[in-house]
Structures are given as structure tokens and as C-alpha cells.
């Protein structure tokens, strides 16, 4: 049975933006957000977001992972509109490694360094939990995202092919190795850690 989370659970705060861990109760908001990001879906899949895109993101889990290891974070502007989404999986594909499935902002907010700030907060949190690396893939048709991740310190580790909605696409594997960090700082860490502990993270050690 899925555990519903406190919908007001702030997992991090930045100036002008805060993140909340999303669950099924936010599916409608997430789907509406995806519909505003149609350009991204058309770029990477050749098609607009499907009507079940949000439900699929919330439900998708790599083999062997539980929902406690999956963090779909909604990014909200100061008035409380959903303007971005971040999806990360803990201990995947190996313990202490994290997989970043998605970072997406709505078109009007891109190119304003929000991605840079959000990614760095995420990295602090991952490092504070002992994470040693972050992995992701970028579609070859998305060179701006490739440049963005290179700026964030990711290195190209390989390429592959997959079929997305019936169309074959080439993707690039990227990894950023994280140096161990001492003590966490800032508002992000205590709130994310407390959210994680509330969610049962401590029990898993
Ligand atoms: C990639 C993304 C998360 C970066 O966040 P951001 O806040 O726009 O990034 P920043 O302002 O810190 O940096 C701007 C850089 O983002 C990248 N970028 C990617 N798509 C972009 C877009 N549609 N508009 C503006 N910048 C974009 C570029 O590298 C850009 O730098 P450039 O002007 O030199 O090309 C954001 O642009 C986005 O949501 N893009 C669409 C979704 C996407 O491609 N996600 C990555 C999937 S792997």
C-alpha cells in the first residue's frame, strides 16, 4: 500500500522557489505542468506528453527499488505555482549512487539559473547522505541540456539507443562523481533530512 505524505512537506527552499515531495494527490497539477512543457516532450519523444505522463512518473520505479528510494520533487514559485519537477532515485544503480531521472522547468523560467541553483542544492543533499555519484542520461537531440550538465560538472561516460514511443533515440550517459563532504549547511539539508527521516529513512540506516 502506498504511504501518502504530508502535502505541505517542504524538502528544500531557495530564494523564490521551494520544493515539495509529490505523490498521487498532485498528479493533476503535475500533468498540467507537463502540458505546459510540451516542447520538451516533443523534442525528446517527437510527441506531446501522454495523458498519463504524470501518473507514469509518479509510479515508475526501477527494478528492485521501493517508493522510499524515489523522490519526485515539485518545484514551486513563491506564489505556489508548480514550475518545475525533479526526479531522483537513491542507491541506484548501486548503493551510494543516485540516478537523476528528470529536471524540467516550464519554458518561461528556463535560462535564469534556477536549474543551476536547484541542482547544487540537490547535490549538497545527496553528498550529505553519503552519495558518491550522480548519474543521468541526456537525449542526443537535446544539446542544450548536455551543455547544462557539463557545466554542472557531469562527464560523458557512454552512449546508447532506446525506443521512446516507437521512435529510436540516441542517449548520452553522464556521471558526476561527488567528493565526500563534511557537515551539511543551509536550510535545504535539515529540511530534506527531516523529511527523509519522517519517511522512514533512518530505519534503513
Ligand atoms: C535543462 C534545464 C533544467 C536547465 O535549467 P535552467 O534553469 O534553464 O538552466 P540555467 O539557467 O542554469 O542554464 C541555462 C542553460 O540551460 C540549458 N538549457 C537547456 N534547455 C534550455 C532551454 N529550453 N532554455 C534555456 N536554457 C536551456 C542550456 O545549457 C542553457 O545554457 P545555454 O544558454 O548556454 O544553452 C532547463 O533549461 C529545462 O528545464 N530544460 C528543458 C528540460 C530538459 O532538457 N531537461 C534536462 C533533461 S536531461
Image (cartoon, rainbow, N blue to C red):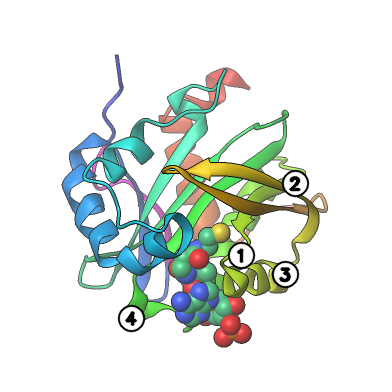
Q: Estimate the spatial distance between the alpha carbons at disc 3 and disc 4, rounded to whole Å.
A: 22 Å
Q: Which residue is mark 4?
A: 108
At x 31%, y 46%, the residue is 9
Of residues 128 and 159, which is closer to you in this image? Answer: 159
Q: Quadrant of the C terminus?
A: top right
Quick check: 122 left or right of 78?
right
The x and y percentages for residue 162 are: 59, 42
Q: Estimate the spatial distance between the alpha carbons at disc 3 and disc 2, rounded to whole Å.
A: 15 Å
Please state the total of marks drawn on the protein image: 4
As drawn, the label of residue 120 is 1
Label 3 or label 2, whichever lies nearer to me, is 3
Instruction: Give whichever of discs 1 and 2 has the lower sequence position.
Output: 1
How many neighbours does mark 4 have within 10 angstroms: few (below 14), some (14-19), or many (20 or more)?
few
Magenta highlight range: 6-13
Q: Residue furthest bottom?
A: 112
Is residue 10 inside the magenta stretch?
Answer: yes
Quick check: 27 left or right of 110?
left
- Tell me whether the residue at label 3 lies in contact with that at label 1, contact meaning CB atoms closer than 8 angstroms: no
- Tell me whether the residue at label 4 lies in contact with that at label 2, contact meaning CB atoms closer than 8 angstroms: no
Instruction: Give whichever of discs 3 and 4 has the lower sequence position.
Output: 4
Instruction: Give whichever of discs 3 and 2 has the lower sequence position.
Output: 2
The x and y percentages for residue 29 are: 19, 53
Q: Which residue is mark 2?
A: 133
Label 4 or label 2, whichever lies nearer to me, is 4
Label 3 or label 1, whichever lies nearer to me, is 3
As drawn, the label of residue 150 is 3
Q: Estimate the spatial distance between the alpha carbons at disc 3 and disc 1, rounded to whole Å.
A: 13 Å
The x and y percentages for residue 135 are: 69, 47
The x and y percentages for residue 67 are: 43, 26
Q: Estimate the spatial distance between the alpha carbons at disc 1 and disc 2, rounded to whole Å.
A: 13 Å
Label 1 or label 2, whichever lies nearer to me, is 2
Amino acid at each position: 500500500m502506498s504511504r501518502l505524505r504530508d502535502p505541505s512537506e517542504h524538502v528544500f527552499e531557495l530564494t523564490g522557489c521551494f520544493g515539495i515531495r509529490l505523490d498521487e494527490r498532485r498528479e493533476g497539477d503535475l500533468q498540467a505542468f507537463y502540458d505546459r512543457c510540451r516542447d520538451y516532450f516533443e523534442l525528446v519523444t517527437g510527441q506531446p506528453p501522454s495523458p498519463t505522463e504524470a501518473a507514469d512518473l509518479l509510479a515508475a520505479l526501477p527494478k528492485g527499488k521501493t517508493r522510499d528510494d524515489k523522490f519526485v520533487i515539485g518545484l514551486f514559485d513563491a506564489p505556489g505555482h508548480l514550475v518545475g519537477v525533479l526526479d531522483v532515485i537513491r542507491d541506484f544503480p548501486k548503493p551510494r549512487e543516485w540516478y537523476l531521472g528528470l529536471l524540467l522547468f516550464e519554458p518561461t523560467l528556463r535560462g535564469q539559473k534556477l536549474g543551476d541553483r536547484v541542482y547544487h542544492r540537490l547535490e549538497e543533499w545527496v553528498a550529505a547522505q553519503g552519495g558518491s555519484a550522480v548519474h543521468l542520461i541526456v537525449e542526443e537531440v537535446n544539446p542544450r541540456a548536455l551543455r547544462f550538465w557539463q557545466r554542472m560538472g557531469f562527464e560523458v561516460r557512454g552512449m546508447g539507443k532506446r525506443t521512446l514511443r516507437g521512435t529510436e533515440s540516441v542517449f548520452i550517459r553522464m556521471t558526476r562523481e561527488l567528493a565526500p563532504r563534511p557537515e551539511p549547511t543551509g536550510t535545504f539539508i535539515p529540511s530534506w533530512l527531516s523529511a527523509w527521516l519522517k519517511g522512514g529513512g533512518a530505519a534503513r540506516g
